[in-house]
């Protein structure tokens, strides 16, 4: 049970650090402008669905966590 708790804490800290980094950076050049990221803007309405960006981030994080698990 301790290993699950430790993993969740590390994952949460990593996501928090990534969120702070993305918030403080002016803009990541490719994030949000990939094909498949939906942006609908109309007067009084704005919808943004970064589908492709989320898939890319998920793929990268999955690879990182897979490598970490193989190292242990």
Image: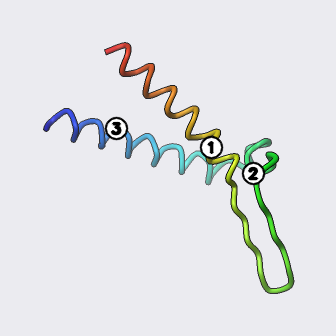
Front in this rendered view, residue 26 or 52:
52
Work out which quarter of the rendered image holds the C terminus and state it. top left
Residue at image mark 1: 55
Q: Can you give x and y, in whole percent of width and height, for residue 63 in the image?
A: 51, 26
Instruction: Name the residue at the left extreme.
Output: 1
Placement of 49 over or under 13, stated as above or below = below
Residue at image mark 3: 10
10 Å crowding of disc 2: few (<14), some (14-19), many (20+) = some
Q: Nearer the viewer, mark 2 or mark 3?
A: 2
Secondary structure found at label 1: helix
Residue at image mark 2: 32
Compared across the picture, whether 63 is left or right of 7 comes to right
Q: Can you give x and y, in whole percent of width and height, for residue 6 in the image?
A: 24, 37
Compared across the picture, whether 12 is left or right of 53 comes to left
Front in this rendered view, residue 13 or 60:
60
The residue at the point 61 percent across, 54 percent down is: 23
The colour scheme used here is rainbow
Instruction: Name the residue at the bottom extreme.
Output: 44
Residue 50 figure quarter? bottom right
Secondary structure found at label 2: loop
């Amino acid at each position: 049970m301790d290993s699950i708790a430790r993993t969740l804490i590390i994952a949460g800290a990593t996501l928090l650090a990534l969120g702070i980094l993305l918030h403080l950076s002016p803009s990541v050049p490719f994030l949000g402008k990939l094909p498949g990221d939906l942006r609908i803007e109309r007067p009084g309405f704005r919808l943004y669905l970064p589908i492709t960006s989320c898939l890319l981030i998920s793929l990268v994080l999955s690879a990182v966590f897979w490598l970490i698990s193989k190292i242990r």
